[in-house]
Amino acid sequence: MRLRRSILTAFCPLAAAGLLSLPAATAQSPAQTASTAAADRPWMNTSLTPDQRADLVIKAMTLDEKLDLVHGTGWGALKDGSPIAEGSNEGAGYVQGIPRLGIPGINMADSAVGVRLAARESRYATLLPSVLGAASSWDPEAAHLYGSVIGRELRDQGYNMSIGGGVDITREPRNGRNFEYAGEDPVLAGTMVGNVEKGVLDEKVMNDIKHYALNDQETGRTIVNAVLGKRAMRESDLLAFQIAIGIATPSAVMCSYNRVNGDYSCENDYLLNQVLKKDWDFKGFVVSDWMGTHSTVKAALAGLDNEEPGPNHPDDQEHDDNDAWFAAPLKAAVQNGQVPMSRLEDMDHRVLRSMFAAGVIDHPPFPRRVVDPFRGRDDAERIANESIVLLKNAEHLLPLDGGVKSIALIGSHADVGVLSGGGSAQVDAPGGNAADPQPGTMKWGEAVYFPSSPLKEIRRQAPHAAVEFNAGTDVAAAAALAKQSQVAIVFVNQPMIEGKDAKTLSLPDDQDALVEAVTAANPHTIVVLETGGPVTMPWADRVAGIVEAWYPGIGGAQSLANLLFGQVNPSGKLPVTFAKSDDQLPHPEVPGIGLKEKAVPGNPDHKELPRFDADYNTEGARVGYKWYESEHRTPLFPFGYGLSYTTYAYSNLKANAQERSVSFEVKNTGSVAGTEIAEVYAELPAKADEPFKRLVAWQRVALDPGESKTVTLKVDPLYLSIFNTDKNSFELLPGEYRILAGPSSAEPPLHATMTVAE
């Protein structure tokens, strides 16, 4: 039956969604079918609201069907030997639908930077630049395109839900998943990720915002207790979620593994019921991270709506995994009154209304349709063009002249590809890892390079130059090649992966020594960084150029070469602060990273890490640049910083308190066209007790040489407000607000005052 169904669904999306039955002996006319559907399935009336349609479905559901919608069917393709439910697209997760009512299952795919596990079914997926890279564009339109690529490729591969949408801020810059997130500032991160997920939803695919909340490190992520006061939480991490959710109107919010102030996030009444559902009026459903559920009654009453992965099969009574909380145990809890039936139906309502609102029932996906790899690559390159950040350009070495005679290209497999991030965000490289080609799904934990060759693209840009590659494994040989070359370009990397934080911000594998040796041999050395987050650079004052490429995606080599040779004028700016050393951070070591496993009392044969606190009250809301400013510390590169091949001047700042707006002039004072990211910050009145500025607005401004434009920006009052814990609300304090505008958080040359009356 499954083979027959798979053949049918490959050519008929309605069948895939469960909206079309197998042929009956007597066929009905289209008019008869529509009439029957209207009578038997009134929820298929598209003139009704998603809430009305969901309520109609719930009235027709049995208790077991109501339970089916609130948990997954198991690990499936993620775990060898785990059963794969019929209807599953063999992605990250599957929630069984209700075929008799025309409700399809929910096929979920990991898709932070592209669709994961494509190679398993001989499919292709576009690798986009890292989310942190895309955040460097400060471009909501590029973010929306980012989500659109993911959404359309999910549909083409038969998925109807994305579980990307990471908006955890860079509170811990050594976090292994920072490449999946959008930086340290809640306004920038929330805006960028919100637009990514809006792009997904606009492709009629269910979207997601995660990991809610304070999942700011991977070290001990299932046992750490994040400790933070409510005001600081609401003005930092939760503000990012609030903004993203407001833009994306997500189908789901995924609760995280960690505890927050004592309670697991997935059974945290404050996070789920009080803030998310009450204060923010979130209408979608809360889905647990995989194995992130720890109870039945407490989790259900605290606001969790859907458990993943759930039991391996709904009827598997022998399943003994600890995460099977919302199957048989929930049924018992409903039957004995511990969980009211109204709460179970609320869970179902939230799932169903999200499905109707996203359009996955009325517009099912297209399983097995071929993804357009060329369109995806072009879109990835466009995003990368805005994402790469030029950090140093001594004596205007860049852009390189096409007439350069010799170039030494060194390190990081730059002959064959560009680095990608690992874990559940890992997209399968076409043909396998370019650094070690082995077709198939990528192995967890390996550093995967995609076939976008910097060597090939640099040779294309400089056809008359001798461009030679050295792997960088022999430092002396690399330095010798650099010495005999006109220009040396050293690629260095920082592979990052889910489940593991970096111990330090230093580059791994003695790459600093490689850079030092090459720079000593050739002062015209440019360093290209392929990193998952900020890194230290003890050689920064000695190299001629520094380019932060992040993980640049399948079009990364083309974007990078175009930037190095001036076909693209860099416009990216840092969404995170780069420290000079780990000692500058609020936590010089990642909390818990040095803990050792201990024997469990009463079970000496079993060892595990002890639970521990990550006390984020140390910095509170002072994340990133706010910490450096309040502590009077000068970082290596500040938040919002990035160079161009032209120069810009700012003038004539005006602030309008009544309209909550600012305006100023930006002029291109250089000789080439470029795009400036103009940033606006605010210092709150003294009674706010905040010794730092906040980002409150920005705009990308495209300017020809000599051209000047007036930039007028509205400032959302929320971004100027403090959270009053006594009133449980944000409030705009009366007093004088100092408004600053300029090219980065450290260089706001314009100052004005905005007065808010009592």
Image (cartoon, helix red, strand yellow):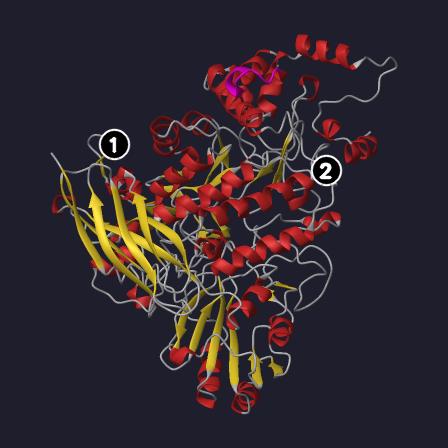
The image position of residue 713, as x and y in percent, is 31, 45
Asked whether 49 falls inside the magenta stretch, the response is yes
**Residue visible at 39% across and 60% down in the picture:** 574
Q: Is residue 64 left or right of residue 33?
A: left
Q: What's drawn in magenta, residue-wise?
A: 45-52
Residue 591 in view of the camera:
no
Quarter where residue 20 is shown: top right
Residue 275 can be seen in this image? yes
Instruction: Look at the numbered disc 2 and give the secondary structure of its residue.
Output: loop
Few, some or many residues within 10 Å of mark 1 (<14, 14–19, 20+):
few
Q: Nearer the viewer, residue 124 or 594?
A: 124
Is residue 294 depicted above or below 381 in this figure? above
The percent position of residue 229, horizontal first and vertical second, equals 26, 42
Q: Which residue is mark 2?
A: 367
* Residue at the outermost top position: 39
Q: Is residue 158 above or below residue 639?
A: above
Q: Which residue is mark 1?
A: 729
For the residue labelled by badge 1, is the local secondary structure a helix, a strand or a loop?
strand
Where residue 184 appears, as percent x and y from the top left, is 36, 53
The quadrant in which residue 675 appears is bottom left
Q: Amino acid at mark 2?
A: Pro
Q: Amino acid at mark 1?
A: Ser
**Magenta: main secondary structure:** loop
Task: From the viewer's perspective, tell me whether residue 41 is left or right of residue 746.
Answer: right
Q: Which quadrant, please, contains the C terminus?
A: top left
- Residue in the picture at 29% in, 45% down: 228
Up the image or down, 527 lies above or below 68; here it is below
